[in-house]
Image: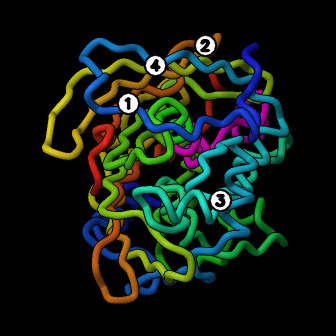
Amino acid sequence: MADDEFAAAIARLVGKPVGSGGPSIAPDPVNQPMIRHWAAAFEDWNPAYTDPEFAAASRHGEIVAPPLMLQTWTMATPKITGMAERGGSPVDLEGESPLTVFDAAGFVGTLAANSEFEIERYLHLGEVISAITVIESISDEKQTRLGPGHFVTWATTYLDEAGEVVGRQRFRILKFKPEGFAP
Amino acid sequence: MNVPASASAASRATRDFATVSVGDELPTLTLAMTPTRVVAGAIATRDFMPVHHDRDYANVQGAPDIFMNILSDTAYCSRYLTDWAGPDAIIKRLAIRLGVPAFAGSTLTYAGRVTAVTPGALDGLVEIDLRVTNDLGDHVTGSALVNLPRAGATT
């Protein structure tokens, strides 16, 4: 991809919603099995997440999902076949996305840089969460310790079924041309 | 390495806001970031990026091994906060910045310090600085805002 073509593709992405333009709807409602799986993986034994009797008597009043599971509910169901060939994308990429634009220009490396959550309220079992994500900014090319790259920042708003905001997230990744890890 | 809290040992008590002061330090947590922990965290957060479970793929990207995903970082930070604060604590905000990667085989040390307290009638807000380090340097730096109840206050 020529430099000016690449710059134009970046300019087209900024300010645009990610994906189809509509919200990403969680494939499953907030549920106890996924919460238990999460709690076991991180050895987080907070009884408000898995003990109904404790949760009922707590400030939460009922089982609540771990607040930092917010991003997990709307993660796409992965398509395992071909994942590495898609540059690590868990789903088929449709149209112009940051991954496809940067991969085509040689910025095949992906590394998370920042994640900032504001939690409006905790989620309860049975709630169906959706997320609306907009690309907030794409930096100029920077020289990083991993190689030259661009920082891509997304802003996501998480909503309940009534359309009320339950949380917000700003998420930043680095798309880079790998030159080896040299911390 | 510290022995991780077991389910039976998990505290069911919540810290009283009135007992928290600026400068208080959270007890450190040491975690051996085994390949199992890296993969378990990636899958539990539904992050299937191959750099978190496929060492060959990580090598092609220039990394010597698989490494922790950022959703696991926010998860462990939230656990670290509520292990200290208790189950009635409410996390209002968590902002983290990743520094050096946490490769499989490294050991992470979690540290936290109270930087501000804002009292309310029935509860209060506690601001905490977080720092997670390994042998390469700062893996995570960040801050959190946690609501804690006052003992005896009903909300």
Mark 1 lies on a secondary structure that is strand
Near-viewer residue (B68 or A69): A69
- The residue at the point 56 percent across, 61 percent down is A104
- Secondary element under disc 4, as helix, strand or loop, is strand
Q: Nearer the viewer, mark 1 or mark 2?
A: 1
The magenta span reads B59-76
- Label 1: which residue? B142
The residue pinned by badge 3 equals A51
Q: Chain of mark 2?
A: B
Same chain assignment for discs 1 and 2: yes
Do labels 1 and 4 touch, CB within 8 Å? no
Chain hosting mark 4: B
Mark 3 or mark 2, whichever is nearer to me: 3
| Pointer 3 local density, CA inside 10 Å: few below 14, some 14–19, many at least 20 | some
Q: What amino acid type should be assigned to the residue bearing mark 2?
A: Leu
Q: Is residue A75 above or below residue A22?
A: above
Reading the image, the residue beneath label 2 is: B136
* Cα gap from disc 1 to disc 2, whole angstroms: 17 Å
The spot of residue A171 in percent (x, y) is: 40, 52
Which residue lies at the image location 54% right of the left edge and 60% below the top edge?
A55
For label 4, the crowd category at 10 Å Cα-Cα, with few meaning under 14, some 14 to 19 and many 20 or more, is some
Residue B100, relative to residue A11: is it above or below? above
Q: Quadrant of residue A15?
A: bottom left
Q: Is residue B64 magenta?
A: yes
Asked if badge 3 and badge 2 are on a common chain, one would say no
Query: In the figure, is residue B6 to the left or right of A55?
Result: right
Q: CA distance from mark 2 to mark 4?
A: 22 Å
* Residue B26, numbered circle: 4
